[in-house]
Image: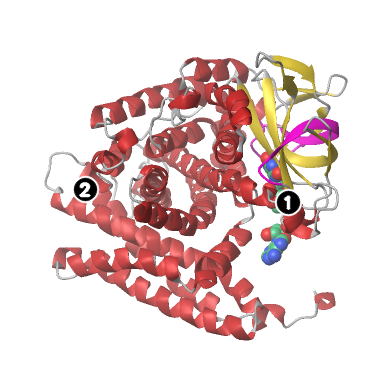
Amino acid sequence: MGQYVAPIRDMQFVLHELLKVEDELKTLPNYSEIDADIINQVLEEGGKFTAEVLFPLNHSGDREGCHYDGATKTVTTPKGFKEAYKQYVDGGWAALACDPEYGGQGLPVVMNNSFYEMLNSANQAWTMYPGLSHGAYECLKEHGTDDQKKTYLPKLVSGEWTGTMCLTEPHCGTDLGMLRSKALPQADGSWLITGNKIFISAGEHDMSENILHLVLARVPDAPEGSKGISLFLVPKFLPNADGGIGERNPITCGAIEEKMGIHGNSTCQMNLDGAKGWIIGQPNKGLNAMFVFMNAARLGVGMQSLGLTEVAYQNAVTYAKDRIQMRSLTGPKNPEKPADPIIVHPDVRRMLLTGRAYAEGARAFTSYVALQIDRELHHPDEDVRKEAADEVALLTPIVKAFITDNAWIATSEAMQVYGGHGYISEWGMEQYVRDARINLIYEGTNTIQALDLLGRKILGDNGAKLRKFGEKIKAFVEENGLDENLSEFITPLGDLGDKVTKLTMEIGMKAFQNADEVGAAAVPYLRVVGHLVYSYFFAQMAKIALEKQDSSDTFYKTKLATARFYFARLQPETATLIRQARSGAANLMALDADLF
Ligand SMILES: Cc1cc2nc3c(=O)[nH]c(=O)nc-3n(C[C@H](O)[C@H](O)[C@H](O)COP(=O)(O)OP(=O)(O)OC[C@H]3O[C@@H](n4cnc5c(N)ncnc54)[C@H](O)[C@@H]3O)c2cc1C
């Protein structure tokens, strides 16, 4: 069913030529030994594993879905998933970017990031099982006790055990302050937890011998709202004294959801009937600890959508070269055949280039963010670590929302390239559209990401983080502003930067009068800032490509054409978005709710 070839050449361009990761990693003591050969080898091997082992299970996993057995309360994943997971664990892939202290391979996040793109292109539903483990690892590593780390981290790192995040309850998703699950303290220092969680991804499955649930609940006398939430580690099987599998804990799956996409991933209703757990961090500070998991997951969701954009694009290109329909408007390009391949038609090219540009923009952007995470974690200079952390905080909601919105557009365009054949399931294209849709919803809907960006990350610190990032853009514009060859990229970049500054100030002023102004502007605002970020990366990529466009390697010509397409066809939507963001709250809030 279709094809997937990891885009290693573009990954190498981003890592080696755009971001110069080897030089950057040399400034981080943990990674000073990492060279281009190691990076390229991981990319090659990751490309093989994902294309050969996971991709063949994508369509069959979607068709078959997960099976729930009510008698045993167990879930069986689609045929082949379990065996592929064993190969993943045996190959050491789970441990790639984890700390050697817990059995990890100690490679940088920026390398793991490229591997995650491949995993998600090959099979998003499958990738969610190990993907959630990684968030659990990050959270426990930062907030767990020494004992918890010793007991659980090696199991998560090896992949023997997987993790989940149990936040959502039937009456609360976005508003976690309303959650009702309860935790009662026990004499031995553990807690007994009772409650019902819904929509828990990978909550029950047959791929690993144990599952570590990270559960939000309230301790007795907790304050109301989000200030009264605590975080607990609740294993499916309690660990033995020797660290192996012990007694079954009463946290069980009551059902799995029927849903639009990601059929290969189990979405579980989880019942906790006095399940034994251990608190992570301090009572009532659970949301703070869980944010480590949530931030990792938000970046992960962006990677899911980059993966889908890439694979949908690749398949649409193959189809567009093969499918013959109608003649080119400028005369036959394939006179010996009854019609030309559809790739001759300008609008088919627009659809393909939309996918290509959104994939390449997202690849550059997420690799940059991943490198900033490496600096945040390992740079010897505290100021650099802080600056990197601020940038990651600013950019995380953009990774989550902008990339997932774009993937919804790009997978739909890729499906459209197939005409009616895209809509039927035989070719696998409609699966990409269905799988892409959830990414706009979970991990905080894209509206919530937009509010986080504009309200908390930008207006909340008087624009300091945005200004700092803007200084990088300004420096690039100033450095290259006089180069006429680059003006087609630099002018719209500089122009958009100025507009974002004005727009931010304008919304900030209005917000003083009426807080609804933030809610009314946030979604188009995030998209405008997303385009500013992509413009910055496309301008840098175009600069490199221009310098090398005469090389025999056609890669650079292609990169340049993609950057030109981006600035000509995608970035201009910012004009409309800015008008929408400026239009204010009144056009949304004028109607009384009962007039809808
Ligand atoms: C397939 C799937 C897998 C999932 N996996 C997990 C998981 O592993 N763990 C987990 O805990 N949860 C999981 N979820 C739950 C998911 O994170 C929630 O569905 C999501 O956070 C939204 O919550 P909700 O569905 O209750 O919607 P609601 O919170 O009811 O929101 C409904 C609508 O109102 C909007 N809205 C709400 N508040 C505001 C506001 N202040 N301003 C503007 N708009 C607002 C929302 O954006 C949304 O459009 C999963 C869900 C699905 C469908």
The reply to whether the magenta stretch includes residue 255 is no
From the top left corner, tell me how far across and down residue 19 is, in percent.
28, 47
Mark closer to the chain start, 2 or 1? 1
Residue 284 disc label: 1
User: Which of the 4 quarters of the picture holds residue 322?
Assistant: top left
Mark nearer the viewer, 2 or 1: 1
Give percent across and percent down for residue 474.
Answer: 28, 69
User: Residue extending furthest bottom?
Assistant: 513
- Helix or strand or loop: what does disc 2 sit on? helix
Residue 167 appears anywhere in the view = no
Residue 264 forms part of the magenta stretch: yes
Q: In the image, is 481 to the left or to the right of 461?
A: left
What stretch of residues is rendered in magenta? 256-282
The reply to whether the residue tagged 2 has its Cβ within 8 angstroms of ligand 1 is no
Task: From the top left corner, tell me how far across and down residue 304 is, in percent.
Answer: 52, 41
Q: In which quarter of the image is residue 32?
A: top left
Q: Which amino acid does label 1 sit on?
A: Asn
**Residue nearest the observer in this picture, 405 or 39:** 39
Q: In this view, does 442 lie to the left or right of 565?
A: right
Residue 496 percent coordinates (x, y): 36, 72
Quarter in which the C terminus is drawn:
bottom right
Q: Is mark 1 on a helix, strand or loop?
A: loop
Q: Nearer the viewer, residue 395 or 591?
A: 395
Q: Report the amino acid beneath label 2.
A: Lys
Quadrant in the rendering for residue 132 = top right
Task: Find residue 557 and name its label.
Answer: 2
Tell me if residue 362 comes above or below residue 553 in the rendering.
Answer: below
Left or right relative to 530: residue 288: right
Q: Residue at x 31, y 52 (%)?
A: 562
Residue sitting nearer the eye, 588 or 426: 588
